[in-house]
Image (spheres, helix red, strand yellow):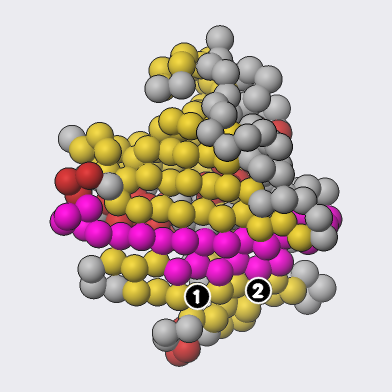
Amino acid sequence: MTPRLLLLLFTGAGSLFAGSPPLLEGEAFVFRVAWGIFGNAGEIRIDAGPAGDHRRITTTTATRGFLRGLFPFDARSEALYDAAGLLQEVKEVSESKKKTSRHALAFDYTNSRADFTDELRPDRNVALDLPPGQPLDLITSLINTRSWNLKPGEKQDALVIFDDDVYELTIHAEAYEEIRTPMGRFKTLKLVPKMEKTEPKGMFKRGSTVSVWISQDGQRLPVRFEVEFKFGSGIATLIDYRKPETAAGNQAKPGS
């Protein structure tokens, strides 16, 4: 597993609940990705545009530091939401030393389907059947768990999209833990998504696990993500946060 594949996991944006998009107007997150001995393997930025009839959430990922010379990778995803907070379309572009991809996913909730189109490989175009629920990508679904108010031992289902596939996940609240980050020290709740309702597939079939730590202060920030593979792990740590409708560059106050 290369840093490129770790960053691919964190590309995209989706939604869990009708009523509002997963990020508020002007809200933004910046994560630093560490991989093994490389503390600055990559960066993830998630930005929410202005409110209105539609809102656009943009996610950019890129390798950084020494690893960029070995594994150059850049990706950009744009997710469009309607006024009710429903995800309407996701467009993603990524480029590495050996591969370029351009694809989109458009949602038809009336007919419970999503149309996947690959600009460079049209043979991959496919119509996906959507299970009940509202679709989201993995990282934004984990960010959105901050609104659930789960307690250790509780769980909640989520519908996750990744590329041209749909995953039905159950997200478990495991335990409270204290986490230190460049933004301060936080009391957090550790959440772990698992595939329990269907046969495991993708990264879950290969034995990988994902965890997120949500701060238990008023802001409920996703202060850390971790992806564990059989031969290593990657960690994304929140290093900067812009509050909704505040000037760019403002950081959240550290948790208690």
Instruction: Identify which amino acid the numbered label 1 is placed on.
Output: His
Residue 159's place in the image compared with 216, above or below, is: below
Report helix, strand or loop for mark 2: strand
Please identify the quarter of the rendering in which residue 243 is found.
top right
Q: Main secondary structure of the magenta part?
A: strand
Instruction: Identify which amino acid the numbered label 2 is placed on.
Output: Ala
As measured in the structure, the alpha-carbon distance from the residue carrying label 1 to the one carrying label 2 is 10 Å
Q: Is residue 182 magenta?
A: no
> Mark 1 highlights which residue?
103
Task: Give the class, few, some or many, for how many residues have Cα within 10 Å of label 1's Cα (few <14, many ≥20).
Answer: many
Residue at horizontal 63 percent and vertical 17 percent from the top? 217
- Picture mark count: 2
Q: Is residue 252 left or right of residue 147?
A: left
Q: Position of residue 116 (x, y in %)?
A: 57, 77
* Magenta-highlighted residues: 68-93
Task: Give the class, few, some or many, for how many residues have Cα within 10 Å of label 2's Cα (few <14, many ≥20).
Answer: some
Report helix, strand or loop for mark 1: strand
Q: Which label number is shown at residue 106?
A: 2
